[in-house]
Amino acid sequence: MKRQNCTIHRVMTSKPFRSYMICTAPRSGSTLLCGLLAATSLAGNPDSHFHSSSLGDWLDDYGLKQTDYASREECLRAVFTCAVERGKGDTDIFGLRMQPGSFDHFMQQLGV
């Protein structure tokens, strides 16, 4: 059987990447991977910042109150700002772990 070469090409841009998403499934080892990436002090603090499909849970996780915001958009903006800060850790890189069960809700909220 002939083995084929696999080459990964990265398009070089003038700006370095500032974020990444680990798309994973439960029980896949992603918690270990996230811990290892965070331990480098170079790759942010990747975690399931949007694991729940509930805005209320997101607000609780970041110590925010919906009544402090004039609109859902402002509220979501505050949640995303907090998530990015937590996901960056002490770096300039934002890491996010996302599982299939929370992806649709996350994308709907991001669209707001």
Image (cartoon, grey):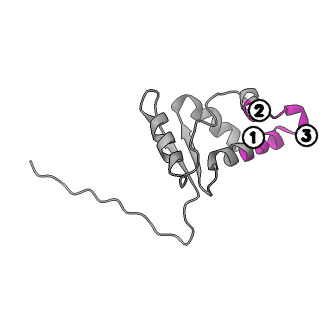
Q: Which stretch is magenta?
A: 61-81
Q: Is the magenta stretch mostly helix, strand or loop?
A: helix
Q: How far across and down, in percent of the image, does residue 43 sit?
A: 53, 52
- What residue is shown with label 3? 70
Q: How far across and down, in percent of the image, does residue 23 sit?
A: 49, 40
Q: In which quarter of the image is residue 106?
A: top right
The one nearer the camera, 76 or 62, is: 62
Label 3 neighbour load within 10 Å: few <14, some 14-19, many 20+: few
Is label 3 or label 2 in front?
A: 2
Q: Does the magenta stretch include residue 64?
A: yes
Q: What element carries label 3?
A: loop
Q: How far across and down, in percent of the image, does residue 8 sit?
A: 34, 59
- What residue is shown with label 1? 79
Q: Are marks 2 and 1 in contact (CB under 8 Å)?
A: yes
Q: How far across and down, in percent of the image, does residue 97 sit?
A: 54, 39
Amino acid carrying mark 3 in the image:
Ala
